[in-house]
């Protein structure tokens, strides 16, 4: 795997400062730390790079949970918070009485590298839909894309930041997003409104959105695309096919409709009488499927890829990999 290179300081000292001394004493390799899981009356678990989990001998109590929560920003309605000026994230677990009974502390690190896999597409003003499993680096890629577009390509970029995932905690966005401007989303349910507000009020050339997950947000993306704004967004799903069959998000791929053909047309096409077709032009030019931090698959023409998938044809994207720090095509 290609070496990940931090662009700015990881602020690990600030993360460690919110932890009780009992947990600090169990951190063997902080530079490799990914996540800390705390659940009331259970052992503290430490997750390191490479999916290596260490179960400590420390039992979580209420005092420990309250101590950590007292040292971070107040959690929002989505139970997420962080440390001011950093990319670290603290996700609170509450019981039915809204009392904190656990949390997940995730280390946020700004990296350079994987966005170079799609740099040529950014330079060509392509709107990109980024897909991938949790932990493959979707948000990391968005953060670096924001920096490239704003600071290197000198475009007016606005990041719609749900739970401060991209720009970090606090009123000033993290340097990792370059000159990009950042609009925070108060309650997550308002993200679709904030997306439209960003376009109407702040005149962006590019808008960046992490995790489009509802039909309202999908409709907002389509509206933005009609206004000629370049869109970079992520969505739930590993592959393009996942989105095609996700009814609330199908508008992201141009929509899917069921069509009944005449007997003659069905025979001519060699298909069943009832088929599925794309409704309209998708709001994105390309689809990026992240396989790993250093490897992506690129569908250069979303329209053709969606049509092929709906007609059960084999869809072969272009596979790109970081080799010696450079993007290389390994499978056209």
Image: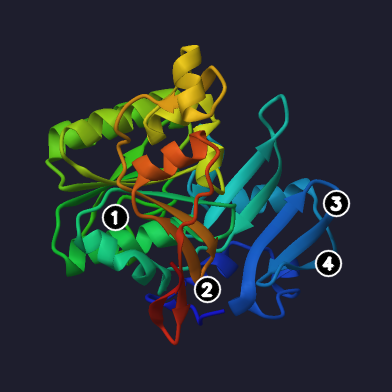
Q: Earlier in the sequence, mark 2 or mark 3?
A: 2
Residue highlighted by disc 1: 172
Instruction: Decide if residue 241 is on the left or right side of residue 95.
Output: left
User: What is the spatial separation of the Cα atoms under label 3 and label 1, in whole angstroms?
Assistant: 36 Å
Quarter holding the N terminus is bottom right
Q: Earlier in the sequence, mark 4 or mark 3?
A: 3
Residue highlighted by disc 4: 56
Tell me if residue 264 comes above or below residue 2 in the rendering. Answer: above
Q: Secondary structure at mark 4?
A: strand
Mark 4: give few (<14), some (14-19) or many (20+) Cα within 10 Å. Answer: some
Residue highlighted by disc 2: 13
Q: Nearer the viewer, residue 72 or 256?
A: 256
Say which quarter of the image contains residue 161: top left
In the orientation shown, which residue stands out farthest toward the bottom? 324
Residue 122 can be seen in this image? yes
Disc 3 + disc 1, Cβ < 8 Å: no
Q: Secondary structure at mark 2?
A: helix
Residue highlighted by disc 3: 42
x, y percent for residue 295: 50, 68
């Amino acid at each position: 795997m290609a070496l990940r290179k931090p662009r700015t300081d990881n602020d690990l000292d600030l993360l460690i400062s919110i932890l009780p001394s009992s947990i600090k004493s169990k951190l063997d390799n902080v530079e490799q730390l990914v996540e800390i899981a705390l659940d009331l009356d259970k052992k503290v678990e430490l997750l390191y790079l490479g999916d290596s989990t260490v179960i400590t001998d420390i039992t979580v109590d209420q005092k420990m949970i309250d101590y950590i929560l007292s040292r971070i920003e107040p959690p929002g309605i989505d139970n997420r918070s962080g440390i001011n000026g950093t990319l670290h994230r603290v996700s609170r677990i509450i019981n039915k009485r809204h009392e904190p009974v656990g949390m997940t502390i995730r280390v946020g690190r700004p990296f350079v590298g994987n966005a170079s896999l799609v740099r040529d597409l950014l330079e060509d003003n392509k709107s990109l839909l980024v897909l991938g499993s949790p932990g493959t680096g979707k948000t990391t890629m968005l953060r670096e894309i924001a920096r490239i577009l704003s600071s290197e390509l000198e475009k007016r970029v606005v990041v719609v930041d749900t739970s401060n995932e991209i720009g970090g905690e606090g009123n000033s966005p993290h340097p990792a997003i370059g000159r990009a401007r950042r609009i925070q989303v108060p309650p997550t349910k308002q993200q679709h409104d904030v997306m439209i507000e960003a376009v109407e009020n702040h005149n962006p050339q590019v808008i960046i959105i992490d995790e489009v997950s509802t039909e309202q947000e999908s409709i907002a993306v389509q509206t933005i695309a009609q206004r000629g704004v370049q869109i970079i967004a992520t969505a739930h799903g590993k592959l393009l096919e996942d989105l095609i069959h996700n009814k609330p998000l199908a508008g992201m791929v141009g929509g899917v409709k069921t069509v009944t053909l005449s007997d003659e047309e069905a025979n001519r096409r060699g298909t069943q009488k009832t088929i599925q077709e794309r409704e309209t032009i998708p709001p994105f030019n390309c689809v990026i499927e992240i396989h790993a931090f250093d490897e992506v698959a690129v569908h250069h023409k979303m329209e053709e890829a969606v049509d092929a998938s709906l007609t059960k044809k084999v869809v072969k994207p272009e596979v790109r990999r970081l080799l010696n720090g450079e993007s290389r095509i390994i499978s056209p």
